[in-house]
Image (tube, rainbow, N blue to C red):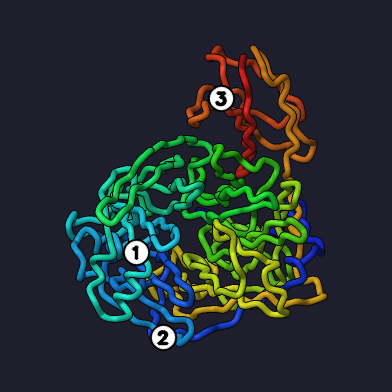
């Protein structure tokens, strides 16, 4: 991958904008005793106690196949953290049956806590049973209160953990959410074998390109998957290692957003568009590109009911775009570690805008980290925090836990295992009332105002594009709703109006995909 950075003076302009309500953000180190550095783990919470499971004890994965994701870096303990005493207890997963112990020490498991139950899906790591690195084909259920009590009292943890095998659960790098008692396993990939970015054939990899929806029957004596349905969209759902956050609006509607993620089909660069996932399906947020956070990082979903604005805050991580020392946004296609703290606002009309705080993280941290909320703000059913539930001048929102701590922006090609570590410093995140504006808005000059007509169409369709993207190559393709390419309709220089002949296909709904470089725009087209 090429390494370069350049100013985006034409692409992105910085303007003064409002804060989150009346608040600025502050990040402060906080000491937790006996909690090691961890990254890409899962967690559950009960009041002031956390369970931390899986993940890795080292930093950024090595690119040398014999050193990548070494078993010695597996987290083989389950940690119980008490935030009142700032003390930590632990128990080894090796007291459990092998199939459970192996999954519970893997990295990038998908997880979701529903009440007192923590669900864990998939995950990647070395399996002694398989004598290879695998993506685990398991879903595990954990009784959170039971496991906390067992660790706290040094009793047997096994009765509080159940597991079943299901090939549809063999996913890593995706996310797990819940809407109306249905679990949503979104995007991710299956990766089996030893990681090797140098062209070797030591692994197989397949993106799911899917939203896998299912319910579970989970009683004292029973645990199984029910009502499984998979929705395939290889255009919009081909991504992994992204951020995935819940949303809510003033009417109580709940949904999730898939934020950017990696990798595009034809280049090792992140996606810039985002996808909303709800009970009625998924849709691309056309007309919005997210520039300041591409990989999974600590994030905070928070709703301001007084202004009816939904905010999603991203803390550090890895990004193709960031502000340099002069405050100018630069593009770096090495996709380095960043210190950026940013947020995306969705207003009452559904309009999305991206902003960054002038405050930054205290280092190149946040990638592979998790945000664990405090109890100072209450939350909605779907874990979105209520900004207006506490009117204090300073609010401890929660904690950034773990993640990768990199010594510099770009370390991948020089990584020998010493350039980064798993971060062992916990950071408190505070909202502090202030009259001073401390955020900058990121304006996107590439927002596409696209007009497709007629729609429904018969044999021909016209596409009207904005003036701003002239003098660049563009591709337009017709795809099925599952993402299958039906026909490449256009690949030539950009024109503001393009007329296309449609192929003879069955009547129905299709995707019209418009791509210029890294930017992607998707429109639904009905063909009659």
Q: Residues within 10 Å of mark 1 (few under 14, many from 20)?
A: some
Q: Tell me how many marks there are.
A: 3
- 214 relative to 527 in the view: left or right: left
Q: Quadrant of residue 80?
A: bottom left
Q: Which mark is residue 143?
A: 1
Picture layout, residue 447 above or below residue 436: above
Which residue in the protein does label 2 denote? 87
Residue situated furthest front in the rendering: 220
Question: Looking at the image, can residue 416 be seen?
Answer: no
Q: Nearer the viewer, residue 439 or 219?
A: 219
Residue 416 place in picture, x, y as percent: 38, 70
Q: Quadrant of residue 78?
A: bottom left
- Residue at the image point whose x is 28% and y is 71% from the top: 76
Q: Quadrant of residue 91?
A: bottom left
How far separated are the C-alphas under marks 1 and 3? Answer: 51 Å
Q: Nearer the viewer, residue 363 or 414?
A: 363
Picture layout, residue 434 above or below residue 131: below
Question: Which of pointers 3 and 2 indicates the residue nearer the eye?
Answer: 2
Question: Which of pointers 1 and 3 indicates the residue nearer the eye?
Answer: 1
Sequence-earlier tag: 1 or 3: 1
Sequence-earlier tag: 2 or 1: 2
Which quadrant, please, contains the C terminus?
A: top right
Which residue in the protein does label 3 denote? 488
Picture layout, residue 449 above or below residue 320: above
- Residue at the image point whose x is 52% and y is 26% from the top: 480
Secondary structure state at the residue bearing disc 1: strand
- Residue at the image point whose x is 29% and y is 75% from the top: 150
- 188 relative to 333 in the view: left or right: left
Question: Looking at the image, can residue 381 be seen?
Answer: yes
Circles 3 and 2, Cβ within 8 Å, touching? The answer is no
């Amino acid at each position: 991958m090429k390494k370069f950075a350049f100013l985006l003076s034409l692409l992105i302009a910085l303007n003064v904008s409002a804060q989150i309500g009346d608040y600025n953000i502050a990040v402060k180190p906080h000491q937790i005793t006996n909690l090691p550095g961890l990254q890409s783990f899962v967690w559950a919470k009960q009041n002031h106690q956390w369970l931390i499971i899986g993940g890795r004890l080292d930093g950024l994965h090595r690119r040398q196949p014999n050193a990548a994701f070494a078993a010695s870096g597996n987290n083989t303990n389950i940690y119980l953290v008490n935030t009142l005493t700032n003390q930590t207890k632990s128990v080894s997963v090796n007291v459990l049956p092998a199939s459970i112990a192996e999954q519970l020490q893997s990295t990038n498991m998908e997880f979701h806590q529903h009440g007192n139950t923590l669900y864990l899906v998939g995950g990647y790591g070395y399996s002694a049973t398989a004598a290879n690195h695998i993506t685990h084909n398991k879903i595990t259920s954990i009784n959170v209160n039971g496991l906390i009590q067992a660790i706290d009292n040094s009793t047997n943890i096994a009765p509080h953990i159940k597991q079943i095998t299901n090939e549809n659960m063999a996913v890593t790098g995706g996310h797990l959410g819940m809407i109306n008692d249905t679990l949503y396993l979104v995007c991710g990939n299956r990766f089996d074998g030893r990681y090797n970015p140098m062209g070797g054939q030591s692994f197989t990899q397949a993106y799911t390109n899917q939203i896998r929806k299912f319910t579970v029957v989970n009683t004292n004596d029973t645990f199984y998957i029910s009502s499984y349905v998979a929705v395939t969209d290889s255009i919009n759902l081909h991504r992994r290692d992204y951020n995935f956050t819940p949303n809510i609006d003033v009417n109580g509607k709940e949904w999730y957003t898939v934020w950017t993620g990696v990798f595009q089909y034809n280049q090792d660069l992140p996606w810039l568009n985002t996808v909303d996932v709800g009970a009625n399906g998924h849709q691309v947020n056309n007309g919005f590109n997210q520039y300041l956070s591409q990989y999974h990082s600590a994030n905070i979903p928070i709703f301001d009911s007084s202004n009816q604005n939904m905010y999603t805050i991203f803390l550090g991580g890895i990004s193709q775009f960031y502000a340099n020392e002069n405050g100018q946004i630069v593009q770096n296609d090495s996709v380095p570690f960043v210190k950026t703290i940013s947020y995306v606002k969705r207003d009452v009309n559904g309009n999305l805008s991206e902003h960054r705080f002038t405050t930054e993280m205290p280092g190149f941290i946040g990638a592979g980290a998790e945000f664990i909320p405090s109890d100072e703000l209450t939350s909605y059913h779907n874990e979105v925090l209520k900004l207006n539930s506490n009117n204090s001048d300073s609010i401890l929102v929660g904690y950034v836990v773990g993640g990768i701590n990199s010594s510099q922006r770009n370390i991948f090609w020089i990584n020998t295992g010493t350039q980064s570590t798993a971060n062992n410093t916990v950071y408190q995140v505070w909202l502090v009332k202030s009259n001073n504006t401390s955020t900058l808005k990121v304006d996107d000059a590439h927002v596409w105002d696209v007009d497709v007509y007629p729609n429904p169409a018969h044999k021909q369709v016209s596409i009207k594009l904005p003036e701003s993207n002239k003098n660049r190559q563009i591709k337009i393709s017709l795809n099925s709703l599952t993402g299958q390419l039906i026909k490449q309709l256009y690949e030539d220089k950009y024109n503001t109006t393009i007329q296309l002949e449609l192929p003879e296909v069955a009547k129905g709904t299709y995707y019209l995909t418009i791509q210029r470089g890294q930017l992607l725009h998707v429109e639904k087209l009905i063909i009659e």
